Amino acid sequence: HKTQMPLLLVPSVALLGLVLQPPSPAARSVRAPRAGRVLLGWGPDPVWSDQSVESISDAGEGLKAITIDAALDGFGKGGQYLQIREPGAEKAGIFAIASAPGASPLEFLIKEQPPSDWSPGTGWLTGASAGAALEMSQAMGSGFLKTDDALEGISTVLLFAVGSGISPIRSVIESGALDGKSVELFYGARTPAMMSYTDKFAAWEELGVSVTPVISQPEGTGWEGCTGYVQDVAREKGIADPKATALLLCGMKGMAVAIKEMAEEAGIPEERVLANF
């Protein structure tokens, strides 16, 4: 997680709490069907509803915590996401849902991002005030645990997140889907000021999640905890029972590749390295 800016990577993209493949050139050209919906090349067609920002607050350097008080169709698993756009805009942003299914209001951790050829950026939203109007889609994706038996035979779950990638990881932690497992979170950021949800660590520990924060650029920050990269800290700790271990991850491409390599070295099958896309 050495590089958290910008989020445009080849061949994959860590986008606002997701690791996604960029759309093909054909998918990048936004088109409006007769029904008036917009196709963006990401999953199903969005079905838009008019909503508004309930609250917005700082959640770390370059990060905003935003809530939307709305019911959300199709949200049942930690790691799902949705689309949000300015009213009437053609392009939408894709955002992982930070709150657990059933929790109210909906919560999001949104990184301040400039616009690009295929994304509107997030400035219009991170710079908004409570009451700002927006359009929101239904929940999308299958989350981290795509089947009901995804953790069958698993006793240990290792969670890996970098930067705003903690958003969907938080959702799965607080969803209760990991109850009864031995769970450890390795959460990385460049500096302590860029680390979100530190106020939730104690509550996560009470849920049975051991939290290991990792800072990659600790110089001058006074940080006394783990330093370097989440995958290296996890590798140094070792994996006691690879046959009964699953990994959930959300972050930059480099981290994802390194974690998959670590899993392979440890003898963890690729199908037990789970992402939220």
Image: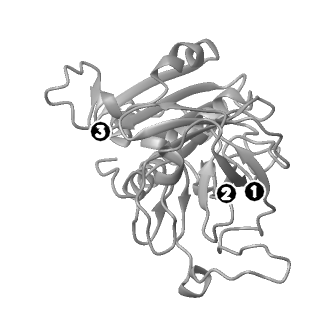
Closer to the chain start, of discs 1 and 2, is 2
User: Which is nearer the eye, 228 or 222?
Assistant: 222
Residue 181: x and y, percent?
67, 25
Closer to the chain start, of discs 3 and 2, is 2
Q: Residue furthest left?
A: 220
Q: Secondary structure at mark 3?
A: loop
Between marks 3 and 2 in the image, the one whose residue lies nearer the viewer: 2
Going 49% across and 26% down the picture, which residue do you hit? Answer: 197
Closer to the chain start, of discs 3 and 1, is 1
Label 2 Cα neighbours within 10 Å, binned few <14 / some 14-19 / many ≥20: many
Name the amino acid, label 1. Ser
Which residue is label 1 attached to? 137
Image vertical order of residue 122 relative to residue 110, above or below: below
Q: What is the C-alpha distance between the residues marked 3 and 1?
A: 32 Å
User: Which is nearer the eye, 139 or 205?
Assistant: 139
Residue 268: x and y, percent?
55, 48
Which residue is label 3 attached to? 190
Residue 274: x and y, percent?
61, 50
Whether residue 87 is visible to the viewer of this picture, yes or no, is yes
**Relative to residue 5, is residue 77 drawn left or right?**
right
Name the amino acid, label 3. Arg
Image vertical order of residue 169 relative to residue 90, above or below: above
Which residue is label 2 attached to? 83
Give the label on residue 273, or none.
none
Q: Secondary structure at mark 2?
A: strand
